[in-house]
Image (cartoon, grey):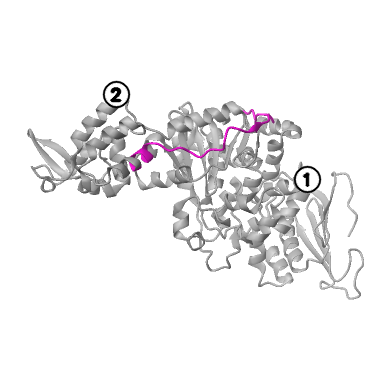
């Protein structure tokens, strides 16, 4: 494994946003790791999902949405996975991309693509203004196990995750629980967000814990406005699919070009809509500053009555009924008679006449994005709306979004489609992924993200544990080394990962539980940062785990004074069945000896 590979493979354990941006294969590897996880397969056995057996994919997907809404919180505490600094990250990724390219991809490095984050002062918005300007958070993505373990973290009562974690969760759960084929799931990453496009019906976008249908996308509510922010304002940096990925900066792409063009077309359809009265009403709901130019009328015993648009929208706030859709009449019935007047309000456009115009435009297939459509609408609005051109521009942007997807002018290379079926069992899928590992990097990385220490090189895990685990360092900074060891000894012994899979040190620190071998890696992280000159030696022999470091010496040459200050040996008991030896020298070089069950370890 060369340096580039170990950097990439260690990133499969820590999964920061920058790591996924630099190594886009990691995004789909995490999805596959979640698909291999027993947790999601247990969801299928829950009564709420079992009673939907035989039902359609859309029905199951809506039930999945409600389950995630009930069981998961959206976590945007950027200190959850600790802090780093800009220079460290820029230096680390210098061989892959320039500081300018990184700045264009991440808000904490200077990205300003979304005016919202530019206006609010992103460091203050995220609570980072209490640190120096170079301090930034590890924006890390969690596995389903780490998301589920938030239930153990103080201050949380449910599972949780940030947007990329929730996108990876939704992609895997849509496949396992709702039966959505992998080829119909496209992951869309921007500098500040991550979503999935599900190629069902008119299209569905996942947005954190929610699902957004096309009709919901154009309903003009605050939730929809927030869901639109990424695709409306940001450049898409990565699209990931079961056939590969395409990256905004890299010339090489691995996604099937036909699948990518299919996504471009389907997403364009999803992000555009005809200008109907319902859509116009949604536009006024979002752009409330224009409501004062409109009035809504009703028939009362053959006589017209009128109400200011903004007053009727006020009634919407406490009602399940909406202006302009099939429940419009029911909303009008809720309005107090005193709020209607019997005369046409001056300086306002009647919505019944607007409806006639929109019906005409639809019948004649006139598009407001084209000159003729804009001219027709302008004539109708002028004289009532002072800045009619601005109004039409805002309306056009509402009914049509041009996503800033990576160019199609890439060098596409076929690396192998991940071909798993919703009809396969978990065991069949794991075995298939294991078979294609030798010639499919995404599948291989999936086992690292899955934490399968039986079949993976340990060095990337160790590298992530001792180089990118700041939470455990922060939590133990006031403890002596002896107190750290005692704290770990008292900690719950259960791992959040089953079988021979391991948590990183910061997962132990956050959730307060971990296997003895995982505790040893946390201890190694503490020793490494307190005494960088200290060589570390870890021995794992099934349940027996020993971590040793010699202070003031080179490995194997003991100082004159004995005892814990001279020869540090920390013993832990593991429920895992792993065996091996790991050495870390003062320069951070990691040496591994992986042993089979019948090869004896030397006695310590």
| Depicted 97 relative to depicted 351: above or below | below
Query: Is residue 15 in view?
Result: yes
Q: Residue at x 70, y 52 (%)?
A: 94
Left or right? Give the position of 423 relative to 71: right
Viewer can see residue 51: no
Q: Residues within 10 Å of mark 2 (few under 14, many from 20)?
A: few
- Mark whose residue sits in front, 1 or 2: 2
**Residue 552, position in %: x, y?**
86, 71
Q: Quadrant of the C terminus?
A: bottom right
304 or 300: nearer the viewer: 304
Query: Viewed as shown, does residue 256 lie left or right of 290?
Result: right
Say which quarter of the image contains residue 224. Answer: top left
Q: Looking at the image, which residue is at 35% across and 45% down?
A: 221
Q: Position of residue 176 (x, y in %)?
A: 56, 34
- Quadrant of the rendered image containing residue 183: top right
- Circle 1 is placed at which residue position? 457
Q: Which residues are magenta?
A: 394-420
In the image, taking residue 132 as reference, residue 520 lies left or right, namely: right
Mark 1 nearby-residue class (10 Å; few <14, some 14–19, many ≥20): some
Q: Which mark is residue 364?
A: 2
Where 280 falls versus 581 (above or below)? above
* Quarter of the figure with the N terminus: top right
């Amino acid at each position: 494994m060369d340096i580039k590979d170990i950097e990439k493979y260690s990133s499969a354990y820590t999964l920061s946003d920058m790591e996924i941006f630099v190594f886009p294969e990691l995004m789909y590897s995490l999805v596959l790791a979640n698909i291999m996880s027993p947790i999601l397969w247990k969801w299928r056995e829950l009564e709420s999902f079992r009673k939907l057996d035989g039902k359609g994919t859309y029905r199951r997907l809506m039930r999945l949405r409600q389950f995630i809404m009930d069981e998961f919180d959206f976590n945007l505490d950027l200190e959850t996975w600790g802090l780093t600094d800009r220079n460290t990250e820029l230096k680390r990724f210098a061989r892959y991309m320039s500081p300018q390219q990184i700045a264009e991809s991440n808000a904490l490095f200077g990205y300003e693509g979304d005016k919202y984050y530019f206006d609010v002062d992103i460091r203050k918005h995220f609570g980072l203004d209490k640190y120096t300007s170079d301090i930034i958070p590890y924006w890390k993505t969690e596995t389903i196990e780490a998301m589920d373990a938030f239930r153990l973290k103080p201050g949380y009562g449910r599972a949780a995750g940030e947007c990329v974690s929730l996108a990876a969760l939704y992609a895997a759960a849509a496949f396992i629980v709702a039966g959505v084929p992998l080829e119909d799931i496209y992951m869309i990453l921007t500098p500040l967000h991550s979503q999935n496009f599900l190629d069902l019906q008119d299209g569905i976008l996942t947005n954190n814990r929610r699902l957004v249908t096309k009709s919901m996308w154009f309903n003009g509510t605050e939730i929809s406005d927030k869901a639109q922010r990424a695709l409306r304002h940001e450049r898409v940096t990565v699209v990931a699919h079961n056939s590969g990925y395409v990256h905004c900066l890299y010339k090489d792409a691995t996604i099937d070009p036909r699948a990518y063009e299919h996504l471009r077309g389907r997403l364009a359809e999803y992000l555009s809509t005809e200008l109907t009265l319902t859509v116009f009403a949604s536009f006024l709901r979002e752009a409330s500053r224009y409501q004062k130019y409109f009035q809504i009328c009703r028939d009362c015993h053959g006589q017209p009555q009128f109400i200011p648009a903004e007053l009727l929208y006020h009634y919407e706030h406490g009602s399940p009924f909406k202006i302009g859709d099939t429940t419009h009449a029911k909303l009008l019935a809720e309005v107090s008679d005193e709020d209607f007047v019997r005369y046409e309000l001056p300086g306002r456009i009647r919505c019944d006449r607007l409806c006639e115009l929109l019906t005409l435009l639809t019948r004649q297939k006139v598009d407001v994005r084209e000159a003729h459509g804009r001219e027709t609408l302008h004539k109708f609005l002028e004289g009532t709306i002072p800045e009619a051109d601005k109004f039409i521009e805002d309306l056009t942007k509402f009914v049509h979004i041009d996503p800033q997807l990576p160019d199609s002018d890439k060098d596409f290379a076929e690396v192998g489609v991940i071909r798993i079926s919703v009809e396969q069992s978990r065991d069949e899928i794991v075995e298939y992924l294991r078979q294609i590992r030798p010639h499919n990097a995404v599948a291989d990385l999936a086992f690292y993200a899955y934490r399968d220490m039986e079949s993976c090189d340990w060095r990337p895990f160790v590298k992530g544990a001792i180089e990118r685990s700041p939470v455990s360092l922060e939590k133990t900074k006031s403890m002596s080394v002896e107190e750290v060891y005692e704290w770990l000894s008292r900690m719950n012994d259960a791992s959040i990962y089953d079988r021979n899979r391991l948590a990183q040190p910061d997962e132990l620190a956050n959730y307060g539980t971990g296997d003895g071998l995982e505790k040893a890696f946390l201890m190694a992280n503490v020793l490494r940062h307190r005494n960088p000159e200290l060589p570390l030696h870890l021995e794992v022999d099934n349940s027996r785990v020993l971590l040793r470091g010699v202070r003031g010496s080179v490995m194997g040459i003991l100082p004159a004074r004995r005892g814990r200050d001279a020869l540090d040996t920390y013993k832990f008991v593991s429920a895992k069945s792993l065996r091996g030896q790991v050495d870390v020298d003062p320069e951070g070089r990691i040496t591994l000896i992986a042993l089979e069950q019948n090869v004896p370890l030397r006695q310590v």
